[in-house]
Image: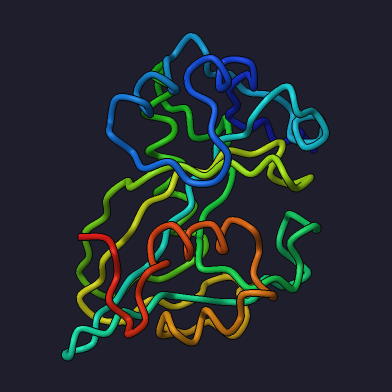
Amino acid sequence: MNEEHVLVIPADWFRRAGYFQGFRPDDGRFLEQLLRPEQLSYRPRSSAEQDPSFKQLIPYVLFRSRTPDGCVRLFAYTRGSGQGEKRLHAKRSIGVGGHISSQDATSVNLQDAYREGLQRELAEEVRIETRYRMACVGLINDDMTDVGRVHLGIVHVCDVEQPAVYPREEDILDAAFTDVASLWQEWDRMESWSQICLQALFGWESHGQAKLL
């Protein structure tokens, strides 16, 4: 069986383009600079997972719903043991996404491959049975963990008209739209990227009102 090859950028290029730790809001220009075609390549996943000289690009989608009174709820779940990244098993997450594979490259434009990979990952992991709109809001870098050192997250917020998003994968466990105040109570159980997003995008709210939009 052929090994999966995943989309990466050199960590050195990330540092030169504008290194940050934690969350960086997207102004459009930084992401465009970061994803310059000459810096994108595919590497075997097994080696990329152990090589911090490259950053694997991971779309990380947050599904957001609002109740009639304006309370924000996020799609949250527990990662099961069958999901690919063993270091995240049993962690709570508010992000859906995964690696961009060389199989997503239907053209020579690797930026198109990212967009196609994002749609493929969503279709594989969840069913979206409502109208929605999605926007890229920022990036995540977490060099404080082994997982984070070899990944770079591109964060998208998907606003859904109804909380009708359902898991396709068996290892997306305990999935439900949960109000932000309750998610803060699960802080210690969350993967670091979800902690970073919760703090950066919803950190000031106390009654479910989001910073964004």
As drawn, which residue projects farthest toward the bottom?
69
Question: Residue shown at 51%/68% (left/top)?
Answer: 94
Snapshot quadrant of residue 31: top left
Question: Residue shown at 52%/13% (left/top)?
Answer: 39
Q: Is residue 95 above or below residue 17?
A: below
Quadrant including the N terminus: top right
Quadrant including the C terminus: bottom left
In percent of width and height, residue 5 lies at: 67, 30
Snapshot quadrant of residue 150: top right
Question: Residue shown at 70%/70% (left/top)?
Answer: 91
As drawn, which residue projects farthest toward the left?
68
Foreground pick, 118 / 108: 118
Q: Is residue 18 above or below residue 202?
A: above
Q: Is residue 204 left or right of residue 55?
A: left
Question: Residue shown at 44%/75% (left/top)?
Answer: 75
Q: Is residue 8 left or right of residue 27?
A: right
Snapshot quadrant of residue 70: bottom left
Foreground pick, 107 / 177: 177
